[in-house]
Image (cartoon, rainbow, N blue to C red):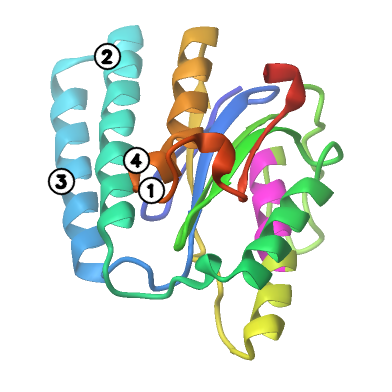
Amino acid sequence: MAEIFYRHLPHLHLPNATYFITIRLAGSLPLDALARLQQEHEQQERLLKARLQGQALVEERYKLQKKFFARYDQMLDAAIHGPRWLAEPRVAEIVAGEIHALHPEYYHLQAYCLMSNHVHLLIDQQDIPEPPPRKDGKRYTALSRAMRQLKSKSGYACLQQIGQHGDFWQHESYDHVVRNENEFQRILTYIIENPVKAGLVKEWQQWPYTYVNPELL
C-alpha cells in the first residue's frame, strides 16, 4: 500500500521498495527559492489532476517528481552560500559511519555519496518491517523511521564535533521510489559520478566518501 506525505516535498512510501534519497544540511538552500520550486510543482500537479486520472495520472506524477528532484539537486550543487560541514573529513566520517551502522536493521545499503552540503543514498527495504504506531499516536513508515534515526544520531554527533547547536540536517528528505533495474543502474551511476561532475576527482573510486555495495561491482 502506498503512503503519500506532503510537507514541502512529495513522498511516496511503498513497503519492500528501493529508494533514492537525498538529505541536506539545514540552511543549505534559501527558503524563497525552495518556496518558488514548491509552488511550481504544486501548480503543475494540479494541471495533471485536472486532465488525467488512474494509471496515466500516476505515471505523469512520477515523471513530475523526477523533474522536480533534478532541479532541486541542481540547486544543491550550485549553492555558494550556507553550511558545507560535510567537506570536513571528521564530519563526513561520522555521517558515513552512521549510514553503515543502520545496515541491515533499518535498510539494506546499496550506495551513497557525501558531498559538501548533501548526501545521496541508495537503499532497499526488502523485508524491513513497518514500525508500529508510537505511543503519542505518530506513525512512521519503515523509510521515515530509518531517516529519522540516521539524522538524529549523525546530527547529534556532528554538532558535538563542530561545537554548534541547533539543527544539523534539514528536517525533510527527498525520496524517490526506484521502479526497475534500468532505473536502479541510472541512479547508481548518478550517485557515484557526483564528485566527478563537480570536478573534485577524475574517477569516482578516488572520492573517499563514495560507497558501493561490493555485490554491485
Which secondary structure lies at badge 3? Answer: helix
Q: Residues within 10 Å of mark 2 (few under 14, many from 20)?
A: few
- Position of residue 51 relative to residue 79, above or below, is above
- Left or right relative to 159: residue 149: right
| Main SS class of the magenta portion in the image | helix
Residue at screen point 19% across, 68% down:
32
Q: Position of residue 69 (x, y in %)?
A: 33, 39
Count of number-bearing discs? 4
Report which residue position mark 4 lands on: 197
Q: Distance between the residues labelled 2 and 3?
A: 20 Å
- Tell which of 101 and 201 is nearer to you: 201
Q: Mark 2 or 1 closer to N-term?
A: 1
Q: Mark 3 or 1 closer to N-term?
A: 1
- Position of residue 153 relative to residue 129, above or below, is below
Q: How far apart are marks 2 and 1 (CA)?
A: 21 Å
- Left or right relative to 88: residue 182: left
| Residue type, numbered disc 1 | Leu
Report which residue position mark 1 lands on: 9
Q: How far apart are marks 3 and 1 (CA)?
A: 12 Å
- State the extent of the magenta-drawn residues as a range: 143-152
Report which residue position mark 2 lands on: 53
Q: Position of residue 207 (x, y in %)?
A: 55, 46
Between circles 3 and 4, the one closer to the viewer is 4
Residue at screen point 77% across, 49% down:
133
Q: Mark 2 or 4 closer to N-term?
A: 2
Q: Distance between the residues labelled 2 and 4?
A: 38 Å
| Residue type, numbered disc 2 | Gln
Between circles 1 and 4, the one closer to the viewer is 4
